[in-house]
Amino acid sequence: MQGGRPTWAEVDLDALAWNFHAVRRRVGAGVRVMAVLKADAYGHGAVECARRLAREGADWFGVATFEEGLELRRAGLREPVLCFGGFWGADEAAACVRENLTPVLYRLDMAEALERAARDAGVVADAHVKIDTGMGRLGVRHEEAAEFARALRAFPSVRVEGVMTHFAVADDPDRDCFTLDQVTRFREAVRLFRERGHAPSIEHMANSAAAFAHPETRGQMVRPGGVLYGLWRDVLPNSAGDPDLRPVMSLRSRVVLVKMVHSGETLGYGCTFVAARETLVATVPVGYHDGYTRALSNRGRVIVRGNYAPVVGRISMDLTLVDVTDVAGVRVGDVVTLLGEEGALAVPAEDLARTAGTISYEITCGISHRVPRIYTEAESL
């Protein structure tokens, strides 16, 4: 890093590609892979990740919102894009048609808006219908699938290309019965759609956990998300076996100050850390606004000069303190690894999540846009 605040995130695009092919090997060549890029690719940077995944052969991209899909189109990506949240109004429906973004439908007024937009453009617009089989968020309730399928016949400019659902507990082997119930409900809903004249070519259910642990859910396409970014220890059940995945993101900074704190002195807001000895403290310019969550205060650890060192005091918005008393030779400018690997040592996102009481997805999604992403790969794009 040269110039500017010495805090950055490294995104290893070769590791991303490795993980994509690990998914491809697991599900088999006959199953399409939709690479999920929502939430800015789980904090990794959607456009750069999409470009690499497109090179590796991703069949589809999945995003949360219409706006996320539009970002990919404006970056020149032409692969099929599914907008999980659908769209918000008539203007967005028209933009979906214009930009060839495929929305997910779960209300009839959405289908009506898409019908008008497609008719005005003189095309037939593809859409996927989401069935709520037990997640309880978006989707047509499975008991109402037949009625919804019948009502969609009133919109000839809308074609049901796909039918989908989402699992609630595919990562929990103790609740496999619930997942199997969802599969049964979904298959019945698809049957009802076909009976009412629809011909979806893609049935898809499997998120990361289901794609690895429940082969019966793969259908024609799977939707891996976190596993693409090497996040799996807290989202895949043991039944998934060894997924052979690599972490993609590292968060690093540099020491900007080293000072001695005397025994009995306190550190940080609230004086929550009291030095029990003469303590050498390194100040690091990264804080909770950068996504290094305050929940790691007095609990987290980082890597400095090939050693683990504990976080001390409360993490501030912009600064974090580290006890480097037991790390020889620490000086201003030394690299500090807050997330990722350094030599034989590692601070995985799953470990940070466990300490903070959350999941690994939130750790990487939380790395803010104030932190520049540095993309690395063996061969430049």
Image (cartoon, rainbow, N blue to C red):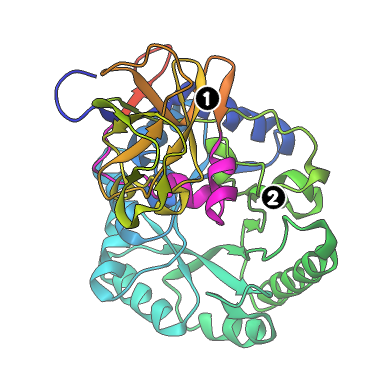
Where does the image place residue 308, in percent across and percent down from the top left? 52, 26
Q: Is residue 9 left or right of residue 246?
A: left
Is residue 37 in view from this perspective?
Answer: no
Q: Amino acid at mark 2?
A: Ala
Q: Amino acid at mark 1?
A: Ala
Q: Is residue 348 above or below residue 356?
A: above
Q: Is residue 276 left or right of residue 186?
A: left
Residue 170 disc label:
none
Residue at position x 60%, y 78% in the image: 136
Q: Which residue is mark 2?
A: 209
| Circles 1 and 2 in contact, beta carbons < 8 Å | no
Q: Which residues are magenta?
A: 348-373
Where does the image place residue 336, in percent across and percent down from the top left? 38, 25
Where does the image place residue 135, in percent across and percent down from the top left? 63, 72
Residue nearest the observer in this picture, 182 or 191: 182
Residue 65 among magenta residues = no
Q: CA distance from mark 1 to mark 2?
A: 19 Å
Q: Which residue is mark 1?
A: 15
Dot 2 crowding, Cα within 10 Å, few <14, some 14–19, many 20+: many
At mark 1, the secondary structure is helix
Residue 359 among magenta residues = yes
| Dot 1 or dot 2, earlier in sequence | 1
